[in-house]
Image: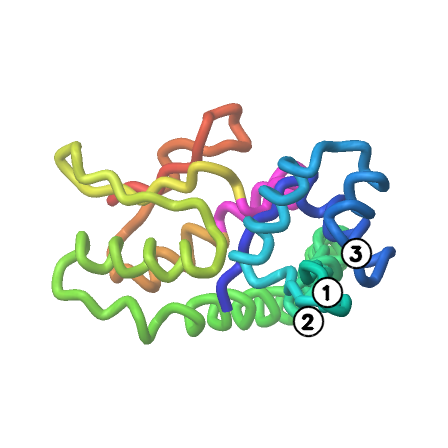
């Protein structure tokens, strides 16, 4: 399923709409203290993403009005904030004392991540495979591009998908390298990393 990274303001807007249950442009303006134009623009964008639906309400012979509410996808999006849980679980897994059990668990995590993309990444050349992986990652909401301007192609994450985890534990970066190495069938190294203060993470052929 495609993941869309919402702006903070979008998330607040969805939370507001969720509280109101059903709203009109006028009630949202009053609630948020913003103009009707701003509300309509945001509603239109969130409708386009499938998070908000619009219903026509008819009042006798007068002009029909519209009400807005969250869709099932919108409600799911609001609940889709797993970062605290992920950081806690990661920390606990890393503290498993039995190293063979720990290695087995992280091996299974790597294999599970690989299996999400393996069916897509089937290209003949490393460049083909990078483009296929990039397309699949973008569909899942990652911000990734392929750069073929140098001697060797590289995969660039323009923002870290695991910021909180990476700040506390560089091993998440090693896991990503391991996943890409397996998928691309080539030796990969992390040439630049957000964790080191770089603006992006770059996965290069070693």
Badge 2 crowding class, 10 Å Cα cut-off, few under 14, some 14 to 19, many 20 or more, is: few
Task: Compare residues 148 and 64 and report the one nearer the observer.
Answer: 64
Residue 176: percent from left, percent from top: 46, 52
Residue 27: x %, y % from top left? 82, 47
**Residue of label 2:** 72
Q: Main secondary structure of the magenta part?
A: helix
Quadrant containing the C terminus in the rendered view: top left
Q: How many marks?
A: 3
Residue 57, placed above or below residue 193: below
Q: Nearer the viewer, mark 3 or mark 2?
A: 3
Q: CA distance from mark 3 to mark 1?
A: 15 Å
Q: CA distance from mark 3 to mark 2?
A: 16 Å
Q: Quadrant of residue 72?
A: bottom right
The residue wearing badge 1 is 75
Start and end of the magenta stretch? 161-174
Residue 106 image point, x, y percent: 57, 65
28 over 65 or under it: above or below: above
Report if residue 142 lies within the magenta region: no
Does residue 83 show up? yes
Left or right: 27, with 110 as reference point: right
Residue 93 visible in rendering: no
């Amino acid at each position: 399923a495609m993941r869309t990274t919402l702006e903070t303001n979008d998330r607040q807007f969805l939370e507001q709409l969720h509280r109101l249950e059903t709203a009109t442009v006028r009630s949202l303006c009053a609630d948020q203290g913003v103009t009707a134009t701003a509300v309509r623009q945001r509603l239109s964008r969130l409708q386009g993403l499938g998070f908000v639906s619009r219903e026509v309400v008819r009042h006798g012979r007068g002009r029909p009005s519209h009400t807005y509410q969250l869709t099932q996808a919108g409600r799911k999006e609001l609940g889709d904030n797993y970062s605290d849980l992920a950081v806690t679980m990661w920390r606990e897994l890393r503290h498993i004392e039995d190293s063979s059990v720990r290695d087995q668990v992280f091996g299974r995590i790597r294999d599970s991540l690989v299996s999400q993309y393996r069916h897509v990444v089937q290209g003949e050349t490393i460049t083909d495979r990078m483009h296929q992986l990039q397309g699949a990652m973008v569909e899942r909401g990652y911000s990734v591009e392929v750069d073929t301007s140098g001697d060797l192609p590289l995969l660039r994450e323009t923002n870290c998908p695991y910021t909180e985890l990476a700040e506390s534990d560089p091993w998440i970066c090693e896991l990503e390298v391991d996943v890409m190495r397996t998928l691309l069938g080539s030796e990969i190294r992390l040439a630049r990393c957000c964790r080191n203060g770089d603006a992006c993470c770059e996965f290069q052929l070693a």
